[in-house]
Image (cartoon, helix red, strand yellow):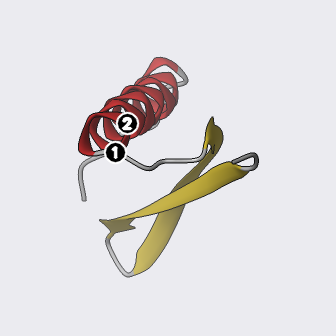
Amino acid sequence: MSGFTIAEVTVAIQKGGRLEHTRLAAAFDVITTQDAARNAGRQIGGGLGEALSLQLQQGKSLAA
């Protein structure tokens, strides 16, 4: 079996009356097992953490 799975995550952070979004997309080999799904989830979570960290590094508060 060949192919791949694309997962996309969008996180919305509310700041006052507006929303800011952080998006992350990743491609994986076809996810056919629970272990593969967990691994993909860990990788997505790590990438999202890095994206949010970068926002903080750039002086953007994640708090409302």
Relative image position of residue 9 (x, y in whole percent): 49, 58
Q: Give how far across and how far down residue 28 sits, in percent.
A: 61, 38
Choose between 39 and 25: the one closer to the eye.
Answer: 39
Q: How many marks?
A: 2
Query: What amino acid is at disc 2?
Result: Ala
Q: Which mark is residue 33?
A: 1
Q: Is residue 34 left or right of residue 1?
A: left
Q: Is residue 46 left or right of residue 34?
A: right
Q: Which mark is residue 64?
A: none
Residue 15 position (above or below residue 61):
below
- Give the CA separation, mark 2 to mark 1: 5 Å
Disc 1 is placed on an element classified as: loop
Q: Residue at x 51, y 24 (%)?
A: 54
Q: Label 1 is placed on what type of residue?
A: Thr
Instruction: Report the residue that reaches farthest toward the right.
Output: 3
Residue at 25% x, 59% y is: 64
Q: Can you say whether 62 is above or below 45 in the image? A: below
Name of the residue lying farthest toward the bottom:
17
Residue bearing the label numbered 2? 36
Taking the spot 45% from the left edge, 77% from the top edge, the residue there is 18
Number of the front mark, 2 or 1: 1
